[in-house]
Image (cartoon, rainbow, N blue to C red):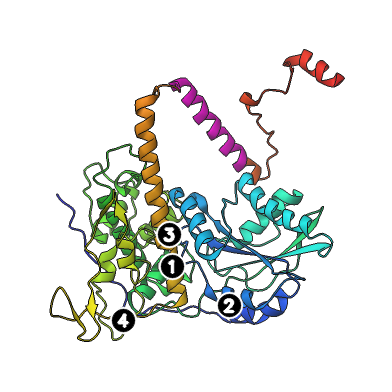
Amino acid sequence: MPLNLRPTFPYPLRTPSWFAGHMSRSLRELPSLLEDIDLVIEARDARLPLTSINTAFDALLSKSRGKGKERERVVVYTKRDLAEKRYEEPLKKAFLAQTGQKVMFADTRIDRDVREVLRHAVRIAKDNQEIIPEMRVLVVGMPNVGKSSLLNALRRVGVRKGKAFRTGAEAGITRKLTGTVRIHEDPSVYVYDTPGVMMPYLGKGEDGAERGLKLALTAGIKESLFEQDAMLDYLLWRMNQRMVAESHLPDGHPAKHPTYLSLLPLPPSFEPTDHLPTLLDALADRLSAKKKGGERDWEFVMGWLLKFFREGKLGGWTLDDLEGGRGVIATKPTMTSSGSEGEREGEGGVARQLQEQMVDGGQSIVQPFVQVDPQTNVSEQGTSPPTPTPTPTPSQELDHQVSLAVQQFLHQNRSTSHSNTSSNSSSSDPNTTSLNQQKKAAKKKRLLERDDKLRAKGVNVQSRKDPSAGLGRGSKKGEIGRIVRGRR
């Protein structure tokens, strides 16, 4: 049975806002606090590379300077293990090209990722040790993007001590500014944790509603503001969109994601559906989620499915549209409330035509822009005037510029990989790496990941040496090697 996918999503007519008192207080206190800060780390959610940007921080940080020089700032996208890794390098290049901003990606459970962030802070402290004897770092970000988890990880890696900041799965755990905590000894580096600050206003119409749903799905906003069925209906729609978009790819293709049909505990005969009650009924039967009297317990199933998604068991997800692949949302709005259409058409809205100018193999994939005569306000290709395009805000411009740059980098990478594959297939032996070597490499990678997870839990795990590196020049193994090395 073919999937009857909805061309547009029925977004809620009203977008709730969540700007609690402690958030307003934090923003008021931030300017005075910045006077003593040498480095600002802005934490963002890797699943929402554009939605988790709070422009209020940009305005405050641009007004104040550091001690004798411009204050350093670095953006760290946390929860990289839950996002799509193919966007990491394009996003780094896009932000560097568009804003000059250094961007890192980190999984706070992995010491290697945390060490990269710590090295950057320590390098700045060493370079400015004469004017900054004790470096102070402030971590800011929206709610539940992983600020406290990042700080605990920096403390774990830097000074080998346990948690100093409260963490939780819901938004709003940190509600006031914490005291300083040391994360490095020589040079001395101290950090502050701040409450997560939500944007006072998410926007009107579809864009504001979609932003809210994405934040609710990732637990970045007060969950009670959105109904669970609305969040999961949006998630189902997105999963079906990705499944349809990748249906032409063969199984095993690196760009093809596993579908919810294989990741969820569904019966083998279950057909893809765009009807949420059908999916909930099937899951309730498989999970034996029943109320008294045998009625299916949808409330339990919805809570289970939300947790399943947030733990990454539905695969990596980057919910922001970085490639302009969901243009139907922007071109055919379903909102009916006044003033909702054309307010801000999301990551795929105002710059949709710019994004669609991207070429595929040298050929334009859409028709060129329609030229308009300013005297008659009538297009050259017809008699009806074009629909006016709303003027984008600075935050929209940034979203669109970054999205377009990501598209360009992805297109370049595809072209480069295609040419490399062609040249390699014609000039080299495809079987240069044996199956046994591939198995050993995969096993080593699994062991290293397991060791990192154990270290994150406080278990003392001995580091594994790279067997390909050897023991040094003229080295030997075993007892003889220890004797020889002892004489050096």
Mark 4 → mark 2, Cα distance in angstroms:
27 Å
Q: Please tell me whether residue 452 is drawn above or below residue 37 in the rendered image.
A: above
Q: Residue farthest to the right?
A: 487
Q: Residues within 10 Å of mark 2 (few under 14, many from 20)?
A: few
Q: Position of residue 404 (x, y in %)?
A: 39, 61
Q: Going from the N terminus, do you reach mark 2 or mark 3 first?
A: 2
Q: Residues within 10 Å of mark 3 (few under 14, many from 20)?
A: many
Magenta part of the protein: which range? 433-453
Please check the rendered image and state whether residue 441 is part of the magenta-colored stretch, yes or no: yes
Q: Going from the N terminus, do you reach mark 1 or mark 3 first?
A: 1
Q: Position of residue 372 (x, y in %)?
A: 23, 78
**Closer-to-camera residue (126/52):** 126
Q: Residues within 10 Å of mark 1 (few under 14, many from 20)?
A: many
Q: Closer to the camera: disc 3 or disc 4?
A: 3
In-image side of 147 versus 298 (left or right): right
Q: Closer to the camera: disc 1 or disc 3?
A: 3
Q: Position of residue 209 (x, y in %)?
A: 36, 73
Q: Which mark is residue 59?
A: 2
Q: Amino acid at mark 4?
A: Ser
Q: Which mark is residue 340?
A: 4
Residue in the picture at 39% in, 36% down: 420
Q: Which mark is residue 399?
A: 1
Q: Amino acid at mark 2?
A: Ala
Mark 2 → mark 3, Cα distance in angstroms:
23 Å
Q: Going from the N terminus, do you reach mark 1 or mark 2 first?
A: 2
Mark 1 → mark 2, Cα distance in angstroms:
16 Å
Q: Amino acid at mark 1?
A: Asp
